[in-house]
Image: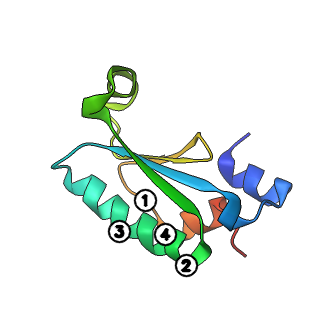
Amino acid sequence: MSPLFKARVDGKDPADRTVTLIGKPGCHLCDDARVVIEKVTGELGSSVEELDITQDDELYRKYWEQIPVVLVDGEQHDFWRVDENRLRRALGAR
Protein backbone atom coordinates (compact mmCIF):
# COMPACT_ATOMS: atom_id res chain seq x y z
CA MET A 1 0.00 0.00 0.00
CA SER A 2 1.39 3.42 -0.89
CA PRO A 3 2.24 5.78 2.00
CA LEU A 4 -0.14 8.35 0.55
CA PHE A 5 -3.11 6.01 0.69
CA LYS A 6 -2.00 4.58 4.04
CA ALA A 7 -2.00 8.06 5.63
CA ARG A 8 -5.57 8.65 4.52
CA VAL A 9 -6.83 5.26 5.64
CA ASP A 10 -5.23 4.91 9.06
CA GLY A 11 -6.08 8.44 10.20
CA LYS A 12 -2.74 8.75 11.96
CA ASP A 13 -1.99 12.24 13.23
CA PRO A 14 0.80 13.98 11.25
CA ALA A 15 2.60 14.61 14.56
CA ASP A 16 2.89 10.83 15.02
CA ARG A 17 4.66 10.33 11.69
CA THR A 18 8.38 10.30 10.89
CA VAL A 19 9.97 11.63 7.72
CA THR A 20 13.42 10.28 6.87
CA LEU A 21 15.74 12.03 4.44
CA ILE A 22 18.40 9.77 2.96
CA GLY A 23 21.19 11.67 1.28
CA LYS A 24 24.86 12.56 1.41
CA PRO A 25 27.00 15.62 2.11
CA GLY A 26 27.42 18.03 -0.79
CA CYS A 27 24.22 16.96 -2.53
CA HIS A 28 22.33 20.05 -3.72
CA LEU A 29 19.13 18.08 -4.29
CA CYS A 30 19.39 16.85 -0.69
CA ASP A 31 19.68 20.46 0.46
CA ASP A 32 16.56 21.36 -1.56
CA ALA A 33 14.66 18.39 -0.14
CA ARG A 34 15.71 19.31 3.41
CA VAL A 35 14.18 22.79 3.04
CA VAL A 36 10.81 21.35 1.95
CA ILE A 37 10.86 18.65 4.63
CA GLU A 38 11.74 21.09 7.41
CA LYS A 39 8.97 23.46 6.32
CA VAL A 40 6.25 20.80 6.14
CA THR A 41 7.24 18.85 9.24
CA GLY A 42 7.69 22.06 11.20
CA GLU A 43 4.14 23.08 10.40
CA LEU A 44 2.64 19.62 11.02
CA GLY A 45 4.78 18.56 13.97
CA SER A 46 6.10 15.40 12.31
CA SER A 47 9.47 13.99 13.35
CA VAL A 48 12.46 14.17 11.02
CA GLU A 49 15.56 12.03 10.80
CA GLU A 50 18.42 12.17 8.35
CA LEU A 51 20.58 9.29 7.17
CA ASP A 52 23.85 9.57 5.23
CA ILE A 53 24.45 6.94 2.53
CA THR A 54 28.21 7.42 2.86
CA GLN A 55 27.99 6.06 6.41
CA ASP A 56 25.87 2.98 5.65
CA ASP A 57 26.79 0.39 3.00
CA GLU A 58 23.25 -1.02 2.76
CA LEU A 59 21.68 2.41 2.21
CA TYR A 60 24.38 3.20 -0.33
CA ARG A 61 23.70 0.04 -2.34
CA LYS A 62 19.95 0.55 -2.20
CA TYR A 63 19.65 4.29 -2.88
CA TRP A 64 22.86 5.70 -4.42
CA GLU A 65 21.16 6.46 -7.76
CA GLN A 66 18.04 7.97 -6.20
CA ILE A 67 19.23 10.40 -3.52
CA PRO A 68 17.73 12.25 -1.97
CA VAL A 69 15.22 9.62 -0.94
CA VAL A 70 12.36 10.48 1.40
CA LEU A 71 10.63 7.89 3.55
CA VAL A 72 7.41 8.41 5.47
CA ASP A 73 7.17 6.02 8.41
CA GLY A 74 9.82 3.83 6.80
CA GLU A 75 8.08 3.55 3.41
CA GLN A 76 9.63 5.18 0.34
CA HIS A 77 7.69 8.32 -0.54
CA ASP A 78 9.82 10.23 -3.04
CA PHE A 79 13.26 10.58 -4.56
CA TRP A 80 15.24 13.33 -6.33
CA ARG A 81 12.65 16.07 -5.76
CA VAL A 82 10.17 16.52 -2.93
CA ASP A 83 6.79 18.06 -3.66
CA GLU A 84 5.54 20.04 -0.66
CA ASN A 85 1.83 19.34 -1.23
CA ARG A 86 2.37 15.65 -1.90
CA LEU A 87 4.39 15.33 1.32
CA ARG A 88 1.63 17.10 3.28
CA ARG A 89 -0.94 14.65 1.95
CA ALA A 90 1.29 11.66 2.72
CA LEU A 91 1.58 12.88 6.30
CA GLY A 92 -2.20 13.03 6.58
CA ALA A 93 -2.64 16.81 6.50
CA ARG A 94 -6.07 17.91 5.45
In the rendered structure, are the residues bearing label 1 and label 4 in contact, judged by CB atoms less than 8 Å apart?
yes
Query: Taking 43 as reference, is 5 left or right?
Result: right
- The answer to whether 11 is drawn above or below residue 50 in the figure is below
Of pointers 1 and 2, the one earlier in the residue sequence: 2
Q: CA distance from mark 2 to mark 4?
A: 12 Å
Residue 57 location (% of width, % of height): 32, 21
Of pointers 2 and 4, the one earlier in the residue sequence: 2
Residue for badge 3: 35
Residue for badge 4: 84
Residue density around tag 2, few if under 14, some if 14–19, many if 20 or more, within 10 Å? few
Which callout, 1 or 2, points to the residue nearer the camera? 2
Instruction: Name the amino acid, label 3.
Output: Val
Instruction: Name the amino acid, label 1.
Output: Val
Q: Residue at x 43, y 59 (%)?
A: 82
Residue 24 location (% of width, % of height): 25, 42
Q: Nearer the viewer, residue 34 or 9?
A: 34
Residue for badge 2: 43
Q: Residue at x 68, y 44 (%)?
A: 2
Residue density around tag 1, few if under 14, some if 14–19, many if 20 or more, within 10 Å? many
Q: CA distance from mark 1 to mark 2?
A: 16 Å
